[in-house]
Image (spheres, rainbow, N blue to C red):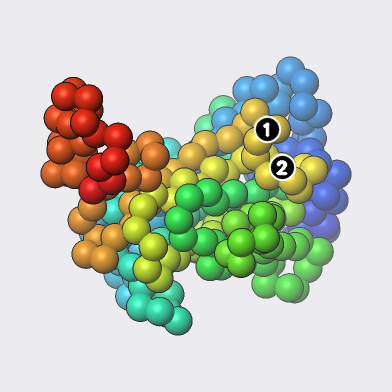
Amino acid sequence: MHRSKRLLAACAASGALVIAGSTSAQALDGQGNRDRVRAASYINADAGMPTANPDVKPGSSCATPDRSDMQKFSAVGTVANNVHNDACFLKDGLKVDGPASFESRGVGFISACPDPDLNAGPRTAVLSDQNGDGRNDLCFQSGYQLRDAAGDLEFHARLNNTGTAGRQTVTWCSDADQNGCADERIKQTITVDWSADGTASFDRDGRGGGLGALIRSLLSGLGLGRGFNG
């Protein structure tokens, strides 16, 4: 088991994606085979946990991802309503390893970027603030979770917001160069709409949906909507 972990970790550190479960791990080199690897990012409903999320489909997983959520703010200084974002690389029905990043844009921040092997091995996780706004927005992980526990062979992050309404967009991607997802092809995105009561949804610009969106649409049709931001 320890030898297998070292082999997987070495391949991950080299920037390769690795097929899980093969008798001899096969690195994919970014050409040909690697193109058939797909990213699957989803919101975990956290069933039975204090952070259980009723807005997320109970069966949300890498195979059947629920990729949108409406969530209530956490109280200031807490992560009570944090959102659990999980992800996999998949090829021919198998989970694939490799370095990856969760990258957050919009409101909110990444509140947890767990070490894939709980500091017990060579795998690493790095949480950082890429744009200097005081909010952590990039979670890099050198490989998937591999510590004989629930959630193994998947990547994990936690998202949080303590008071800024709007949309948080989180892209998860293969990221061997550890610089975010803009330059990557293997990626998928989830969205979380944060509000005080957990019921508001937002358009692509992060503005409120519902009645506000209807009013904006009507005013826009009359040429009067430029100053309305409801």
What residue type is disc 1 on? Glu
Across and down, in percent, residue 62 comes to 46, 42
Q: Which residue is mark 1?
A: 184
Query: Where residue 112 sits: x, y (%)?
Result: 56, 67
- Residue 88 shows in this picture: no
Report the Cα–Cα distance between label 2 and label 1: 7 Å
**Residue occupying image coordinates x 65% and y 39%:** 181
Looking at the image, residue 105 lies above or below residue 24:
below
* Mark 2–mark 1 CB contact (< 8 Å): yes
User: Left or right: 83 with respect to 48?
Assistant: right
What residue did someone put label 2 on? Answer: 175
Q: Residue at x 57, y 44 (%)?
A: 172
Q: Which of 155/207 is in front?
A: 207
Q: Helix or strand or loop: what does disc 1 sit on?
A: loop
Per the image, label 2 sits on a secondary structure element best described as: loop
Identify whether 27 is placed above or below 60.
above
Q: Quadrant of residue 63?
A: top left
Residue 16 is left or right of residue 171, and the answer is right
Q: Which mark is residue 42?
A: none
Which residue is at 16% across, 24% downward?
222
N-terminal-most mark, 2 or 1: 2
> As drawn, is 209 to the left or to the right of 135?
left
